[in-house]
Image (cartoon, rainbow, N blue to C red):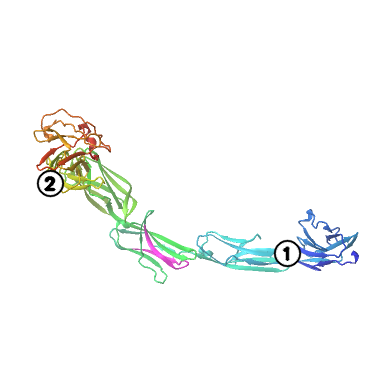
Amino acid sequence: MLSESTIFIEPAPIANATYGKPLNFTCTCPDPWQSASLKIPGENGFKFAIFKDFYCQVPIDKERLYSVACSGDTITFGILHPVDNITWQCIFANNSVNIGNNVTKVNINPEKPNITMQQWTYVIQEGEDVSIPCNFIGNPISNVTWEHNNSTIKLSDLRQPLTLSLKNVSRSAAGDYTCKVTVNYKGTFFASETVSLVVEYPPTLKPSNKTTVREGTSDVRLFCDVVTDGNPAKYSNLIWQHWIGNTFIRKLDPDNLPNGSPIKTLSLTMQSISFNDIGTYVCLTTSSGVGGNITQSASTELVVEAIPRVLLTTNIFYGQVEKSFEVRLECVGNPPVSSLKVNTKLESSPPPFYNKTKIEKPIRLSIYDTEVVMNGSILEMKFGILKSKFDSTFVLSAENPVGIKEYVFFVEAYYFPSEPFHIHIKEFKTYVSLEWKGTIPDLDMKYEIVEKNISGHDQVVYRLPGSNLPSYTYSLTNFDTKNTDSIIQICATNVLGKNCSSTFKVKHIDPESKSIDFDFILDNGVYLVDGDTKGKNGVPKLPYRPNTKESDYLTAGDQMEEKGWDNDAVLNSDTSPSLLLEIPRQTEESDITQYLTCSAGYEREKQRNVDWWTQA
């Protein structure tokens, strides 16, 4: 019978629980029984009940407080939020008979604290951020702190984990940091762990003061003193850098390099100072630590006082007659240029009138093969449109408080070369003679005989200086041994440029063949020639050129009716024909003259520097 049964409760009579965690105990009753309930003795009613052979579960409104599990005659009750010193009782019932002859009493113990660290040493570079977490357990927690140098720097709000976050860490923050957890319940319990923070930093450098010297000074020394060693105090890659403004100029090696012992001074000695040495000098040290390379730098200024420097790549300036012309003279100095003058040398021929303008503005110049920008002075000499040739010598005087710099330069004006004209060709057994006219005066010019190559690799076979002659000649020799045709061009050149005739071809053929017709033979032995073919791939028929000025041409005789082109050549096009002279080998000398100007007079300017390449 149920009334004679004993209820077994485990654990009993004391049920130990951990603070903040659920408590489970079991109640076992021999059959028969119909229901079981959970209650606190002395309270009216019970917390909840279950029925045998029905669902074993806690009512919905009690699920946040209790749990239950059934296994035959054994029921496990769970108290989700146990309270210390509370007694619990199991009541079993069958046919209105209740039995509950055993109880168990709750005893809650504290959860002792414990700490887990991710790592024991943190290494960072000065200026970086660091986060150090402290993972802990324990209940009830009274406080969690981070301590450094016997001072509390962070107090926990009991959330897990307690992370120590340090921003922009300085070298003074290095040292030990301790995380401490306290549980104060039925006694006081502590747990603590300590980590080390290592801060790597560069040395403290003190540069020498601003240095001012004159150009030409010898043995100028710059210094960088190591005031405080870095961590670690091992330095490598000790160098000096030279800067002008934001432009890097060069790298320089220091005088003294470390030889096992810590370095205290980094020096740089320059044997002889020039204007190019002006600027900022930066000393750099590198320390190799766990966190990577650490670089430290300090800078000092070197001021070089120097007479003005004239920035010219040439001392000769060339102008072209009938064109606008100006000369631009640039100077820099330290202190800045105060006076900039230009005069004609006494023994020089007088130049045409010109206007002078001085401008102060940034100037580009080369310092140790690096382009930099400095404030400078510019003198502009504007001649306007040149009317005639001249040759004058000038002296530029640039002055500042250090001294005066004089610079002699030359200004010359010439006409642009005129195209050689009236080209006359004579063919002999072993050579071909060229004759042409140039525009007088031509003492400033040279004439070039150019053998053209369709690949673009032209060859100047001869240069002839201008000598104010009415005509010039040159012989192309060894034609009896050459097996290839020659494309020839005559160019007039001077310092301003080049102006060339149209190209023409001297072609070798068998003596028996004949590819030119002699339409007219003039009294002076000159032949007028019509080509055999027509079209852009042939030689166009040439018009008779009127002798409006007998002295200007090599031909003679009365003016004949002008012939027009059978197929006009278009100037300045890719299909314009070369003039082709096919000269058969003959036992007797022959003399053939042909104009190489294939346009009317008003078109003459269009064909300057135009090569005609279409082959006949």
**SS class, disc 2:** loop
Q: Is residue 137 above or below residue 578?
A: below
Q: Position of residue 62 (x, y in %)?
A: 79, 55
**Horizontal arrangement in the rendering, residue 422 relative to residue 298 (left or right):** left
Q: Give the magenta part as a residue range.
A: 221-242
Residue placed most toward the observer, 515 or 568: 515
Q: Which residue is mark 2?
A: 430
Q: Is residue 383 visible?
A: no
Residue placed most toward the observer, 206 or 126: 126
**SS class, disc 1:** loop
Quarter of image, res 545: top left
In magenta stretch: residue 42 = no
Q: Residue at x 78, y 59 (%)?
A: 66
Question: Mark 1 or mark 2: which comes first in sequence?
Answer: 1
Residue placed most toward the observer, 170 or 367: 367
Quarter of image, res 582: top left
Mark 2: amino acid: Thr
Q: Quadrant of the N terminus?
A: bottom right
Q: Position of residue 242 (x, y in %)?
A: 36, 58
Q: Which mark's residue is nearer the viewer, 1 or 2?
A: 2
Q: Which residue is mark 1?
A: 19
